Amino acid sequence: MRRKIATQELKGAWRMHRREFLGALATSPVMLVMSGCAGSGRAAIDESGSVMTVLGPVDAGTLGMTLIHEHLYADLRPYAEQAGNPLSPPAEVVDVVLPYLRDIHRLGCRTLVDCTATTLGRNPALIRQLSEASGLHMLTVTGAYVAAGGRFTPSYVLDETDAQLAQRSIGEWRNGIDGTGVRPGLIKLGVENDLLGDTERKVLRAAARTHLQTGLVIASHTGPWGDVEPGRNGCCAFAQLELLGAEGVAPAAYVWVHAQNEVQASHHVRAARDGAWVSFDGFRPGQEGAYVALIRRMWEEGLLDRVLVSQDAGWYSAGQPRGGEFKPFTPLFTALIPALRDAGFDDEDLRTLLVRNPARAFTIRVRVRQS
Ligand SMILES: [Zn+2]
């Protein structure tokens, strides 16, 4: 019964979001932006309301069950080493990765967001190949990752202005990435200090400009990790939200990536109340209790419709034999979903978490901050 009431509330919330969504479409500047893409070589298309996959735009309603934060292939060598000795994914990557994708397709998954950042081995052509082979929708990223102590930060991110960095991303959106024709479906950042440094502020401003031009959501890997004092991870997210807000971007355009590293649940609640997406995205078998508790707290606060879940699993690691130890994508389906059901979450709740929220989060739509 308790659950039934919640379901009604959620249905109401979904209807409300749908109205907001349709209303926003009518006034979205994306149409105007896309119409202004002179020289891009493509006809002007209104892509608002779609999700940009590596095979092109699809209706957000067709995404189905979605893993919102995973990795297929990554190069975790320092960027200087990557630049000095570039490695292309070997042909065996497809052999190694494809069975893991087929496993989740069998379990009902239909979309996978590859959150591998631009300088951590992002490879749009490979993702497209794996999308075609697996039948899964897939998304790739644009943006800049400046976390991990700058280990993956290329010199152009240090040298260029926010406007120049935004132009890089907007160029990828308009023309595709590195000549592949594959266009990004989100802006991925990596930021790790609650007192944002100059470079972090710059890439956030660049992301804000990119969002306002493209309608792509901003998903930001947010540190520091859980071994520092409680509250720091959330403070980093709030600092980012404040900066984005000052640039005119609404919280609904922001995904707080790795929010599970914040131990103060009140911070999750505050971010979600503000309208941000709260992403619990590092699930591993054995963490069922912790993840159910995180999600239940949000449900109790009436905020299930701001929560995203995933595993940060995968990936074939460049330079390692057979890509090293690949973490499968199945545990969310075989361990977390059953645990959520045991805890009383019903089909509607699961649909909200795994189908509706991802579709809403990754829909191409400019979210302007209301003052
Ligand atoms: Zn990740």
Image (cartoon, rainbow, N blue to C red):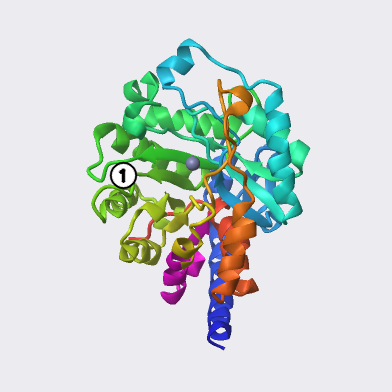
- Give the prevailing secondary structure in the magenta stretch: helix
Looking at the image, residue 43 sits to the left or right of residue 207; the answer is: right
Determine the residue positioned at 59% across, 45% down.
Answer: 113
Using residue 113 as the reference point, say whether residue 248 is left or right of it.
left
**Kind of residue at badge 1:** Pro
- Does residue 18 appear anywhere in the picture? no
The residue lying at 67 percent from left, 28 percent from top is: 93
x%, y% of residue 351? 63, 66
In this picture, which residue range is highlighted in magenta? 293-309
In the rendered image, the vertical position of residue 273 relative to residue 171, given as above or below: below
Quadrant of the drawing holding the C terminus:
bottom left
Front residue of 187 and 338: 338
Q: Nearer the viewer, residue 369 or 265?
A: 265
Q: Secondary structure at mark 1?
A: loop
Q: Is residue 353 visible?
A: yes
Residue at x-position 48% and y-position 17%: 82
Q: Nearer the viewer, residue 47 or 60?
A: 60
Magenta span has 303? yes
Q: Determine whether 120 is above or below 213 in the image.
A: above
Residue 319 locus on image (x, y percent): 55, 20
Residue underneath mark 1: 224
Tell me, yes or no, whether the highlighted magenta stretch contains residue 294: yes
Q: Residue 346's x, y, as percent?
A: 61, 75
Q: Is residue 265 above or below residue 212?
A: below
Residue 90 lies in quadrant: top right
Where in the figure is residue 85, as x and y percent of width and height? 50, 11
Q: Quadrant of residue 138?
A: top right
